Image (tube, rainbow, N blue to C red):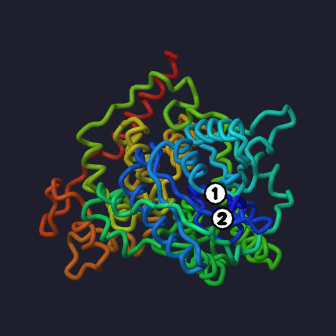
Amino acid sequence: MSADVTLLWLRRDFRFYDHPAMVAAAANGAAVIPVFIYDDQVAALGAAPKWRLGEAVDHFADALAEKGSRLILRKGDPLEVLRALIAQTGARAVHWSRAYDPASVARDKAVKAALKEDGITAESQAGHLLFEPWSVQTGKGEPYKVYSPYWRAVKGRDIAAPLKTVSELRAPSNWPDSETLSDWQMGDAMNRGAEVVAKYAHIGEARAQGRLSTFLRDHIEHYKTERDFPASGATSGLSENLTYGEISPRAVWHAGWRHVQEGAAGAEHFLKELVWREFAWHLLYHFPDLAEANWRKEWNGFPWRPDNNDAKAWRRGMTGEPFVDAAMREMYVTGTMHNRARMIVASYLTKHLMTDWRVGRRWFEDCLIDWDPASNAMGWQWVAGSGPDAAPYFRVFNPETQLKKFDKTKDYRDKFILEGQSNPPQTARDFFDAIPRSWGLTPDQSYPAQIADLKGGRECALAAYHAHRDTD
């Protein structure tokens, strides 16, 4: 094989436009061998994220083939896999996009150090975030812990323009062997749910770009005023594609910024939501126990319940609260959930049902195709009251009043709750085809009664909070 060979280690960056690691790998005309490694981190993913990652890999393999390239698949320890490929191909360099969760940071540092010790060029590039976590600090040189000053600190920064699409990847004279994606069975844990969710997923770079274009054309003007209404379709849906790097945050930022300059009323608010994602990642990077430990230590010892039968009803979308149940069913049907709905179901679980936020976080981790460890952890702690920049604990979202305010016409409820409708839409019927058969739920059953008294549940939650605060 040619000595002028570079490995491009792909993880969650399945695109050609604005791909710094791909640009670096292809620099100076080097032959590029793209590789995806099924490692312990992939194996540990929940059912829905693992299935969706497999779909992203499969789609990008096809996209590479269209450019005359290939995606090499290997399973095992990343360092061992990369060393084996280096020995087989004569590659002298490895490039990849940075990741910022604790496990990935530890893995990548070890790989980089070992490869450099071997005499191999090992370089990581930005691409997952707008700003590197260490580049945004307070005047005291500390990471921001509150969103509003964080937004003020970054909104005026220059963000480099997206890099041009890599139009051609030079192939090596010989390709190394590749494993077969289907042998990895990445969708097995989804069971029959995969077939349902596949109808609603938007996989690949082209569909991500299409989503962005549609949003900018039809919804950005009214984004701020309509984004909280789940049936409005006013959100971009790009969380799914950002999760797998099928579109870069820099590309989204610049597209949105053009609309800010043109005076679109909702454009700045859209960018603030993009930066909220950024803020979550910066927090996880600087405080790596965010996903498992209460950010506010005074919450340690709070009498949240562990998993319980009420949480079981919550998981199954059978609480008797239409807003909560519609949201949970949306997740099983589409793999995603509207952001307003995420706040409602999280508040209901942690406050009305007094269940530990980690029970909900772990369930979302298993069920969301747009699962993002930083946003998921911060979102759950924000609602529970234990997290950074948290909502006050006394803010308890009432799902009944929230439904009246944000779903007056009941379009969202009817889209996902079949019971009581003579002619339910396909989305409502799909719920019963997506869920595990072991749940024993059927379309001919009656809608359940409320499992919790909303007023009483709120009072109990506040009483527990005050008692805990007084004894802390």
Can residue 461 be seen here? yes
Q: Horizontal and vertical percent for residue 192? A: 25, 65
**Label 2 sits on residue:** 32
User: Depth check: 105 or 230 in front?
Assistant: 105
Q: Horizontal and vertical percent for residue 396? A: 47, 45
**In contact (CB < 8 Å): disc 1 and disc 2:** yes
Please give the count of numbered marks on the rendered protein.
2
Mark 1 → mark 2, Cα distance in angstroms: 6 Å
**Label 1 sits on residue:** 7
User: Depth check: 224 or 399 in front?
Assistant: 224
Tag 2: amino acid? Val
Tag 1: amino acid? Leu
Q: Quadrant of residue 321?
A: bottom left
Mark 2 lies on a secondary structure that is: strand
Q: Horizontal and vertical percent for residue 196? A: 31, 71
> In the rendered image, which quarter contains the N terminus?
bottom right
